[in-house]
Image: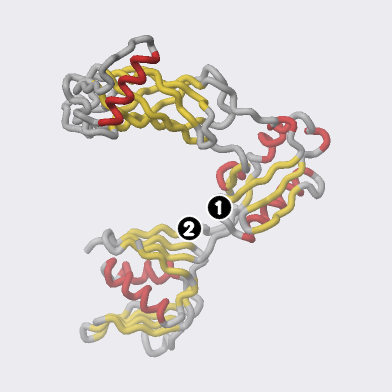
Amino acid sequence: MKSLLLAALLFSLDANAARIKDIANIRGVRENQLVGYGLVVGLAGTGDGKTEFTSKSMVRMLETIGVKLDNKNVTSKNVAAVIITATLPPFARAGNKIDVTINAIGDASSLAGGTLVQTPLRAANGDVYAVSQGQVLMGTDNGKGHMTVARIPSGAMIERDVQSDFAARRMFRMTLSNPDFTTAVRMAKVLNQDLGGKYATASDSSTVDVIVPTQYHGNAVEFLALIESLDISPDMQAKVVVNEKTGTVVIGEKVKISKVAISHGSLTLSIGGDEKKKAKGKEEDGERYFTLENGANVDDLVKALNKIGVKPKDLITILQSIKAAGALQAEIEIL
């Protein structure tokens, strides 16, 4: 009999302590996506065929380097049109390098062995932040992988700094990864207690505004390094997550069950029932009886059902039935 997979979380506030840096982000400190259009050359006959945009791009590229063509309709199976994507990290500086991903957009069958010609990479505002060029790598040696997608590690050079007055800022907005009013209030209290004053305010379930103390003016980096390592105890919504395909059940500690009785096949389950009539874990004439005390949580229920060999599929059905009866004080999320 397969055992149920269970994750019971949050058994105590101290055990659940997490650093602020692990549960919140500083608004405005984020990555930016870059994209560009270019050509991969040097292919062994695996490039685009008579693709119009590839032909025009080849002509434009050759004219840029001083090659004038009378015939504007140029085709070559050794060239492929591609889209280049990259991620610009926060506080990027000119001269740093980033990885790029190359994606064929024509009818090329493989980018193996090709070289990306110098291509500008633009942000959403249209400004060029990096330039990419280099030999593409397929990530496979047997020729059986996805041959129209490739990478160039450190294949783009950042051309301009991402401007920021970060160190001079007098206020920061912290955004919780999992919005929760209780967690936001706890974070503000921990910050104010550590800083010795009213510097942090929870403005909603996902936002905590923090004022930089006077002694850290002009040195906000040191201030953030100080507060991001503080521990708080994030709260969580009572939730049960089940995966019917794998039989996995993930349960939070705050999930509670009210008084209820369930009959499922040969199983009769009573929570908060009369223990004088039904003993805990008793079996009579092929019928399985189980009684839990009133106020039991789902962890108690799952452990009890595991002991008598209830299958994952049956457990999921039982949990859904308890929820439908209004006795499961939690949300059920089915994957």
Label placed on residue 103: none
**Residue 114 sits in which quadrant?**
top left
Considering depth in this image, is 245 or 47 the residue closer to the camera? 47
Above or below: residue 9 compared with residue 227: below
Q: Which three-letter amino acid code belongs to the residue tagged 1?
A: Asn
Above or below: residue 113 compared with residue 53: above
Q: Position of residue 249 (x, y in %)?
A: 36, 62
Q: Position of residue 326 (x, y in %)?
A: 46, 81
What's the residue at 72%, 35% (across, down)?
223
What's the residue at 26%, 68% (across, down)?
311
Q: Is residue 289 left or right of residue 326?
A: left
Q: Which three-letter amino acid code belongs to the residue tagged 2?
A: Leu
Q: Is residue 91 left or right of residue 83?
A: right
Q: Secondary structure at mark 1?
A: loop
> Between disc 2 and disc 1, whose residue precedes?
2
Q: Position of residue 139 (x, y in %)?
A: 27, 27
**Residue 203 sits in which quadrant?**
bottom right
Residue annotated with mark 1: 16
Residue 4 is at least partly visible in this image = no
Considering depth in this image, is 29 or 64 the residue closer to the camera? 64
Considering depth in this image, is 118 or 243 the residue closer to the camera? 118
Q: Secondary structure at mark 2?
A: strand
Residue 34 is at least partly visible in this image = yes
Above or below: residue 267 compared with residue 188: below
What's the residue at 35%, 23% (across, down)?
152
Give the quadrant of the C terminus. Answer: bottom left
Q: Do the residues under discs 2 and 1 have CB atoms within 8 angstroms?
A: yes
Residue annotated with mark 2: 9
What's the residue at 38%, 11% (across, down)?
65
